[in-house]
Image (tube, rainbow, N blue to C red):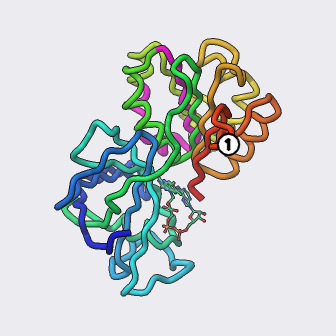
Amino acid sequence: MPKPELNAVLTRKTVIRPGLALFRFRPEGWDLPPFRAGQYAMIGLPGTTPRHPDAVAEERPLAADKWVKKAYSISSPPTELEELEFYVVMVPNGQLTPRLFTLEEGDRAFIVPRLLGDFILEAPTDAKVAFVGTGTGIAPYVSMIRTHLHAHCERRYALFHGVRTSDELGFREELATRATTSECFSYLPCIDQPQQDASWTGLTGWAQEHWKSGTFSAALGSPVSPADTHVYLCGNPLMIEAMKETLRAEGFEMHSRKNPAGQIHVESFW
Ligand SMILES: Cc1cc2nc3c(=O)[nH]c(=O)nc-3n(C[C@H](O)[C@H](O)[C@H](O)COP(=O)(O)OP(=O)(O)OC[C@H]3O[C@@H](n4cnc5c(N)ncnc54)[C@H](O)[C@@H]3O)c2cc1C
């Protein structure tokens, strides 16, 4: 791994709500390597970077002479060669995110110039694809949708985005617009704390409940089944476990090198 240096400049920071933001970084002195939609980058900062005032004491204090590096899924498409976009939530007692959130446009961070990961769209081109993400777990799907939606319209896609309240629905406008302009894409934003969001009239509850009650089948135009549907899971580990259990009961199998035909694809953030 290359020695850390501040090799990327923050060109845009878009705050969705306090502690939740989009970060766009441009490499300085190096070119972005080719990557595939769904992959991630390692972002790093030195321990000397101040922590955000809304953060609390970190669980594992970081020494000033150390760097901290963490993985972040890329939400921009691989066709954008100038910059990388990331969708990040601040973990108040975390090591990196309270530092990342103090950066302003023009500030610099370290990005490992090698982009990684195998959470990529491998479903057959005539498959139905269900993307299930919670919180910032929709970042890889945004890159995939931006990349594949027009190129492969024979696939149908449904993107379920589970959050607590509707102010956490990053990319909402873009995804809602894509859903109205593309016949093969459905956007399913869903909140699980409706008691705190009185004006919300959309979906509520959990991904696995919507899977069982037919929300995904309706969005994808016909009943979902292991024969013709691939399911991508990313974000909160509780959602991932609940969805895996639900899917396995219906005959879906985990995708892996040993079982490349498996229809369940998982990216665990923690
Ligand atoms: C392949 C991969 C891709 C990732 N992509 C993203 C991404 O696109 N956006 C993003 O925000 N994070 C992403 N993460 C998580 C990220 O790498 C860090 O773990 C996270 O930002 C916390 O770092 P920290 O140093 O601030 O906290 P730490 O000191 O590492 O504390 C970690 C704790 O934070 C919590 N946590 C971690 N990630 C999240 C999260 N996303 N939402 C809520 N709580 C969390 C967990 O409880 C975890 O135990 C990804 C992780 C992996 C492995």
In depth, the one of 204 and 83 nearer the eye is: 83
Question: How many dots with numbers?
Answer: 1
Q: Where is residue 95 drawn, in percent x and y?
A: 47, 73
- Picture quarter containing residue 46? bottom left
Q: Amino acid at mark 1?
A: Lys
Q: Quadrant of the C terminus?
A: bottom right
- Determine the residue positioned at 62% across, 51% down: 236
Q: Nearer the viewer, residue 88 or 247?
A: 247
Specify few, some or many for label 1: CA neighbours under 10 Å numbering under 14, 14-19, or 20 or more.
few
Of 113 and 207, nearer the camera is 113
Q: Identify whether 9 is placed above or below 200.
A: below
Would residue 220 appear left or right of 139 to someone viewing this image?
right
Q: Is residue 255 magenta?
A: no
Q: Position of residue 23 (x, y in %)?
A: 33, 53
Quadrant of residue 10 within the rendered picture: bottom left
**Disc 1 target residue:** 258
Q: Nearer the viewer, residue 135 or 117?
A: 117
Quarter of the image that includes the N terminus = bottom left
**Residue 39 in the image, given as x and y percentages of width and height:** 44, 47
Q: Is mark 1 within 8 Å of ligand 1?
A: no
Residue 223: image x %, image y %? Answer: 70, 16
Q: Residue at x 70, y 50 (%)?
A: 238
Q: Residue furthest right?
A: 249
Q: Which residues are magenta?
A: 154-176
Q: Is residue 178 left or right of residue 60?
A: left
Q: In the picture provided, is 244 more to the left or to the right than 84?
A: right
Magenta stretch encompasses residue 157 = yes
Q: Is residue 33 above or below residue 123?
A: below
Residue displayed at 41% across by 56% down: 18
Q: Which residue, as the protein is rendered here, is positioned at the far front? A: 258
Q: Residue at x 26, y 39 (%)?
A: 80
- Secondary structure beneath dot 1 equals loop
